[in-house]
Amino acid sequence: MLALSRKKNEAIVINSDIEITILDIKGDQVKLGITAPKSVPIYRKEVYLQIQEANKAAGTSEGIEALKNFLG
């Protein structure tokens, strides 16, 4: 893991097309702004993990049954 120090209004660039800017710092919270192409999905980690779990469940017989019940 690369650890960087940044101050408010400073940014980092990833792969020349993704920019992450520090917008605000309040106590132990940091507000980030992310500029990236629309083709790059951006998720909070907890949401990403939920999506992964839902995708795994959808591939099981229980997940398929739940989908059938949802669709009617």
Image: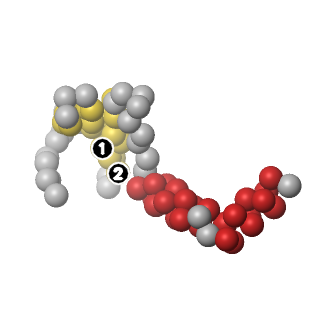
Instruction: Write down the residue under mark 1.
Output: 25
Q: Relative to residue 52, is residue 71 drawn left or right?
A: right
Question: Left or right: where does residue 36 sit relative to residue 1?
Answer: right
- Horizontally, residue 65 falls left or right of residue 53, namely right
Query: In the image, which disc is placed on residue 29?
Result: 2
Q: Is 20 on the left-hand or right-hand side of 71?
A: left
- From the top left corner, tell me how far across and down residue 55 is, in percent: 55, 59
Q: Amino acid at mark 2?
A: Gln
In this rendering, the answer to whether 18 lies above or below 3 is above
Does 22 appear above or below 68?
A: above
Residue 49 location (% of width, % of height): 46, 61
For the residue marked with disc 1, what is the amino acid? Ile
SS at badge 2: strand
- Dot 1 and dot 2 residues touching (CB under 8 Å): yes
Q: Is residue 50 visible?
A: no
Dot 1: what SS?
strand
Residue 43 placement (x, y as % from top left): 43, 47
Closest to the observer, 23 or 40: 40
Question: Residue furthest toward the right?
Answer: 72
Q: Quadrant of residue 12?
A: top left
- 46 or 64: which is nearer to us? 64
**Image-quadrant location for residue 32:** top left
**Mark 1 → mark 2, Cα distance in angstroms:** 6 Å
Query: Residue shown at 61%/62% (left/top)?
Result: 58
Which residue occupies the foreground of this view, 58 or 1? 58
